[in-house]
Image (spheres, helix red, strand yellow):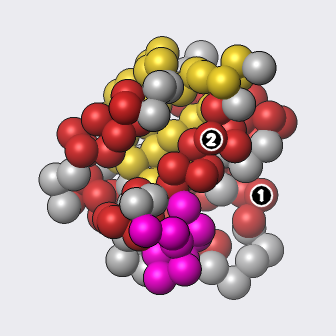
Amino acid sequence: MSEKTLAIIKPDAVKKRVIGRIIQRIEDEGFNILGLKMVKLSLEEAKQFYSVHKEKPFFNGLTEFMSSGPVVVMLLEGENAIKHWREVMGATNPAEARPGTLRREFGFSIERNAVHGSDSSQTAQTEIKFFFN
């Protein structure tokens, strides 16, 4: 089933200059990139985007990190795109991610793990609307 998902290349990966390598992997995995742009989130925008996590202890650190530098947001489409993208990203903790996954290759820590992806179709709809009207 073809579906859409949101992908974000986080500030740590942008700073490491691995945008092209991540996009190449996205294309190699068969995703269609329907939208792509670089943005700099304000702290308020990051808090709004991650509002689902506002009661969690990592919320402030996450939102400060996500507003610390530019990010690349992409609207991806493909067969089972949400599940497929999450497999390509790897586990949240890069140390636990399978070899060959983006987080294992480019991530530094649970917070600074290179990429983001929607975790469900409902989340994907909300996240896509946030960046792509």
> Who comes first in sequence, dot 2 or dot 1?
1
Badge 2: how crowded within 10 Å, few (<14), some, or many (20+)? some
Q: Quadrant of the N terminus?
A: top right
Residue lying farthest to the left in this orientation: 17
Describe residue 77's horizontal placement relative to residue 27 as left or right: right
Label 2 SS: helix
Give the residue drawn at x 16%, y 53%.
Answer: 17
Q: Identify the residue position indicated by label 1 in the image.
A: 52
Between 59 and 98, the one lying in front of the other is: 98
Describe residue 75's horizontal placement relative to residue 113 as left or right: right
Between 101 and 62, the one lying in front of the other is: 101
Q: Is residue 98 magenta?
A: yes
Circle 2: residue type: His
Residue 113 position, x and y percent, is 44, 68
Between 8 and 129, the one lying in front of the other is: 8
The magenta segment is: 90-99
Describe residue 4's horizontal placement relative to residue 120 as left or right: left
Which quadrant of the figure has residue 85? top right
Residue 68 in view, yes or no: no
**Label of residue 87 in the image:** none
Describe residue 59's horizontal placement relative to residue 102 as left or right: right
Single out the mark in the foreground, 2 or 1. 2
* Prevailing secondary structure of the magenta residues: loop
Residue 90 position, x and y percent, is 54, 61
Q: Identify the residue position indicated by label 2 in the image.
A: 84
